[in-house]
């Protein structure tokens, strides 16, 4: 079995300025280890994003391989009657 470590440094947009200043200061080991790539994260910005998120909750099962979705634990009767969380988007 192989294990791979992935680190995610999450912060505001000014974190990019910190990365650039570290590069100029010659602290390339820190940048190379912890700040290799930038990926912008915007979160939920519109109704389509809400629908995608809610659909995920409505389709994800636990334990895996069962028909118990994450929302079924809380609103089982409503789900049995046809309610789907994604409809609230």
Image (cartoon, rainbow, N blue to C red):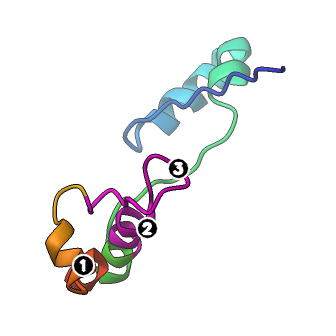
Tell me the residue that label 2 is attached to.
59
Total count of labels = 3
| Residue 44 drawn above or below residue 2 | below
Give the side of residue 18 with respect to residue 7, left or right.
left
10 Å crowding of disc 2: few (<14), some (14-19), many (20+):
some
Q: Using the rendered view, name the quadrant where residue 67 is placed.
A: bottom left
10 Å crowding of disc 1: few (<14), some (14-19), many (20+):
few
SS at mark 3 in the image: loop
SS at mark 1 in the image: helix
The numbered disc on residue 80 is 1
N-term mark: 1 or 2: 2
Residue 30 highlighted magenta (yes or no)? no
Q: Does the rendering let one see residue 22? A: yes
Give the side of residue 4 with respect to residue 8, left or right.
right
Give the side of residue 6 with respect to residue 87, left or right.
right
Which span is picked out in magenta? 52-72
Q: Using the rendered view, name the quadrant where residue 35 is placed.
A: top right
- Which residue sits at x=43%, y=67%? 59
| Residue 4 drawn above or below residue 64 | above
Residue 23, percent from left and from top? 66, 24
Tell me the residue that label 3 is attached to.
64
Residue 74, percent from left and from top? 17, 58
N-term mark: 3 or 1: 3
Residue 49, percent from left and from top? 37, 74
The Cα atoms of the two marked residues, 3 and 1, are separated by 20 Å
- Which residue sits at x=83%, y=21%? 2
- Which residue sits at x=34%, y=78%? 51
């Amino acid at each position: 079995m192989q294990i791979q470590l992935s680190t995610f440094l999450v912060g505001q947009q000014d974190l990019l300025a910190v990365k650039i200043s570290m590069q100029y200061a010659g602290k390339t080991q820190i940048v190379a280890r912890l700040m290799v790539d930038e990926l912008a994260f915007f979160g939920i910005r519109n109704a389509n994003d809400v629908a995608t998120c809610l659909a995920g909750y409505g389709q994800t099962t636990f334990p895996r391989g069962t028909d118990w979705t994450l929302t079924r634990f809380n609103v089982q009767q409503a789900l049995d009657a046809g309610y789907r969380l994604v409809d609230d988007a």
